Amino acid sequence: MSDFTADNGPAKGDAKSSLFHETTRTKRRNAAEARFKAYGIAAIATGLFFLVALLVAILGNGLPAFKQTFVTIPVELTEAKLDKNGNRNPEDLAKVSTFGYKPVVTDALVAALKAESIEIPFAKEKDVEDILSASVAAQVRDTVLANPELIGETVDFRLLASSRVDGYFKGRVTREALARDKNLDAEHLDIADAMVAAGLMKTTFNADFIFGADASESRPEQAGIGVSMVGSLFMMIVVLALALPIGVAASIYLEEFAPQNKWTDLIEVNISNLAAVPSIVFGILGLAVFIQIAHLPQSAPLVGGLVLTLMTLPTIIISTRASLKAVPPSIRDAALGVGASKMQSVFHHVLPLAMPGILTGTIIGLAQALGETAPLLLIGMVGFIASNMPDGIASGFIDPNSAMPAQIYEWAKRADPAYYERAWGGIIILLVFLMTMNIIAVLLRRRFERRW
């Protein structure tokens, strides 16, 4: 019987080797396979470790943004200060500015503290107003303008605490840090602790962060991401309405109908190159073409959607062509063999089978566009440019607005740590949107998937 010469068999001349005994070469090969398996497990473990660390960092820093410290006190809406004429005329009421409402709110806070026997250690009692946000006067004023019948009554208001008081209860601000702070003293924190014990102050869920608008740099406690979410929504509508039909139509033509010549080769090469172009280049292009030449409104979701459409088109075209190529040629041949035209074979047979891949590529392209920041900054879609929700559909497309990634960027670069916290909270909301879009892509793929 001849000796085995394969790697897993006995070497020629080795008297002790057999099928049931590992040779030195086999041991080395098995050891190499074990090391490669260990490397793979280590790589996966490392990736999972960093993923978990990232999620812990995002949730740990961002979840506090969904809670806010509020002060609930009764405010006497004195007619002598807010409606001197007593006629409840909206024009006369609007003449009273926030400066006229500020002492009303301060007096209400002082009265609430005295009613709970909370000592005010300041020489001037009005200094206690630093506990409240600078936006509370505007909040009370807006409520009175919307409901003039409240004048003359005492109304319970849920007012925002200042960002530093809020940070104190979240662990972001310490008493030692206040030694270098000109806006708040340790005495204010003593009063805040007493207010919490008396039930006047409480940290609860803040829906305005999700549905509100951005605020000035001095009022981080008032800032919200809701208006930016609407801006991103209108941008995605523009991208979906333009990128999907244009990208799919271009892919069908290039893959199924276009002749193979140097022109189509040139187009294919340029599409592949455009997919690798940095997004900021598309922002410069949008600034030059859509704003400076076409004179479209700056900072509008319409312009942002057009810019993101240019950026997303190559991704959709490439993924759609790959899906069309994945359909077996026998499908086309069978359709043509029974008398179908070229267009009928494509639209009745090939396209439905390629639909799962097309939808997946489209949603992934939209998810990528949703997270882009650089091109939006170049066309002016920055934070604090829209203070209210759009009035209608047309307003949502052409009025100045921001977008979630641009809003997060603006918050992250502001000096107040409260905005840094809100940037992390915005990242959580953005990730929820991205995860939702990817889940939809998976579900659509399974829904339209066909086996052959």
Image (cartoon, grey):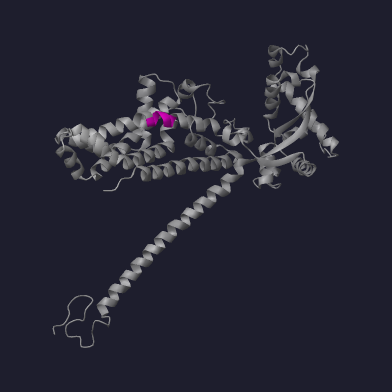
User: Where is residue 412 drawn, in percent x and y?
Assistant: 53, 39
Residue 283 at least partly seen: no
Closer to the camera, 18 or 349? 349
Residue 356 visible in this rendered orientation of the protein: yes
Q: Eyeballing the image, is 145 above or below 188?
A: above
Residue at left offset 53%, top offset 21%: 391
For the point 77% across and 38% down, which residue is it? 200
What residue is rendered at 40% in x and 33% in y?
375
The answer to whether 65 is drawn above or below residue 43 in the figure is above
Q: Residue furthest front?
A: 338
> What is the magenta range?
235-240
Counting every numbered tag in the picture gives: 0
Q: Which image quadrant is residue 328 in?
A: top left
User: What is the quadrant of the N terminus in the image?
Assistant: bottom left
The percent position of residue 396, horizontal first and vertical second, equals: 48, 24
Name the residue nearer the viewer: 57 or 370. Answer: 370
Taking the image as shown, residue 425 lies to the left or right of residue 329, namely: right
Q: Is 238 within the magenta? A: yes
Position of 440 relative to 95 (above/below): below
Q: Position of residue 228 (x, y in %)?
A: 51, 32
Q: Nearer the viewer, residue 159 or 292?
A: 159
Q: Residue 325: image x %, image y %?
A: 23, 43
Quadrant of res 210 = top right
Q: Main secondary structure of the magenta part?
A: helix
The quadrant holding residue 36 is bottom left
In the shown orientation, is residue 149 left or right of residue 49? right
269 part of magenta stretch: no
